Image (cartoon, rainbow, N blue to C red):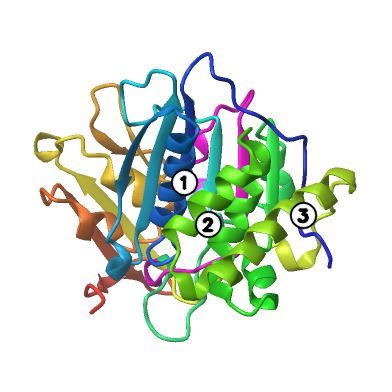
């Protein structure tokens, strides 16, 4: 089996301070199940553990994430930006979205290279247009973090007979990074997965652990053309204008986290601002998700002489 991966060492947690593990993905991938197994492992190891999660956004093609912190004494349930010891991403773009939360100097990045392109990632939301997706490659991300483990977990799980156990396969990879006995992981897994799928999940877990051992001895894989995502092409020229009413912004940060092109940020006053207008595709996701209607997106078609020819209607 070929290893679509880049491996730069493997980390282990310490018990001197709480260990921070951030698990992210798309609705329906099993992010919550992975976090529950990890939390149970910590309990079986007599450690204090706190878990905080946001889920239930699958209908919007949205992000699902779970913070897990464990140690001898843990106070806060959430992980601050740049403080995650391990970032486990069940979907590639979600891993990129949360990469800033990983400790770049000492953290470990574990990710499935599977790409789930959500509906809102289209440059032009009409039928037949090219979807947009972050073009960072495995090697590029590996150069930005201390340790990276990226693999095609979905394809590996499919070869085991059930693609839905890709999350358990990634859990097996995580188990080689965190210093807990294998038997404790197996006990937690047996408690939390349905009995009828336990055998398949156990096989996936062991395959993830075995993959790490194989990857330790392998040279960093060169990213081939299959991993290089071409830049999207839009045949329609458009002018996009995004405006934010600062007085209405309540600093919820939803627009920043959910922007597919990462062109929004929070300023020093915790107000959302547009930082890269050229990258904005007019997908309107920020406008739709803003709970206080502080964001408005205006899209105009551009005629051949480069003059606005009229405002486009919002996609249905």
Magenta span contains residue 311:
no
Badge 1 marks a residue whose secondary structure is: strand
Q: Quadrant of the C terminus?
A: bottom left
Ranked by sequence position, the earlier of labels 2 and 3 is 2
Tell me the residue that label 3 is attached to.
210
Ranked by sequence position, the earlier of labels 3 and 1 is 1
Q: Position of residue 282 (x, y in %)?
A: 34, 61
x 47%, y 86%: residue: 128
x 65%, y 44%: residue: 182
Q: Is residue 51 left or right of residue 261?
A: left
Foreground mark, 3 or 1, reads 3
Name the residue nearer the viewer: 281 or 100. 100
Q: Position of residue 301 (x, y in %)?
A: 33, 71
Name the residue nearer the viewer: 276 or 111. 111
Tell me the residue that label 1 is attached to.
23
Badge 3 marks a residue whose secondary structure is: helix
Q: Is residue 154 left or right of residue 60?
A: right
Give the residues drawn in magenta, as a range. Answer: 96-120
Tell me the residue that label 2 is attached to.
90
Residue 306 in sight in this render: no
Q: Distance from label 1 to label 2 (Cα)?
A: 8 Å
Name the residue nearer the viewer: 182 or 228. 182
Name the residue nearer the viewer: 50 or 194. 194
Q: Distance from label 2 to label 3 (Cα)?
A: 18 Å
How would you rate the neighbour count of disc 2 (Cα within 10 Å): few for under 14, some for 14-19, many for 20 or more?
many
């Amino acid at each position: 089996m070929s290893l679509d991966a880049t491996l730069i060492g493997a980390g282990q947690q310490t018990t001197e301070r709480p260990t921070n593990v951030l698990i992210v993905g798309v609705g329906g991938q099993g992010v919550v199940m992975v976090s529950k197994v990890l939390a149970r492992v910590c309990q079986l190891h007599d450690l204090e553990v706190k878990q905080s999660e946001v889920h239930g956004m699958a209908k919007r093609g949205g992000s699902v994430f779970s913070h897990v912190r464990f140690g001898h004494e843990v106070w806060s349930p959430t992980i601050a930006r740049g403080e995650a010891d391990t970032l486990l991403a069940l979907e590639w773009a979600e891993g990129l979205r949360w990469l800033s939360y990983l400790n770049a100097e000492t953290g470990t990045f574990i990710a499935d290279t599977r790409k789930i392109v959500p509906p809102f990632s289209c440059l032009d939301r009409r039928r037949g247009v090219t979807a947009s997706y972050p073009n960072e490659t495995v090697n590029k991300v590996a150069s930005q973090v201390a340790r990276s483990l990226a693999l095609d977990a979905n394809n590996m799980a499919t070869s085991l007979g059930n693609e839905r156990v890709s999350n358990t396969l990634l859990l097996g990879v995580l188990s080689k990074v965190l210093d807990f006995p294998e038997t404790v992981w197996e006990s937690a897994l047996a408690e939390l997965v349905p009995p009828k799928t336990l055998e398949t999940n156990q096989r996936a877990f062991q395959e993830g652990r075995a993959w790490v051992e194989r990857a330790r001895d392998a040279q960093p894989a060169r990213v081939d053309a299959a991993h290089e995502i071409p830049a999207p092409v839009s045949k329609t020229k458009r002018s996009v204008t995004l405006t934010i009413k600062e007085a209405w912004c309540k600093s919820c940060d939803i627009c920043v986290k959910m922007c597919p092109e990462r062109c929004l940020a929070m300023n020093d006053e915790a107000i959302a601002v547009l930082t890269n207008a050229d990258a904005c595709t007019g997908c309107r996701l920020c406008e739709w998700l803003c709970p206080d209607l502080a964001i408005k997106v205006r899209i105009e078609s551009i005629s051949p002489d480069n003059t606005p020819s009229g405002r486009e209607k919002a996609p249905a």
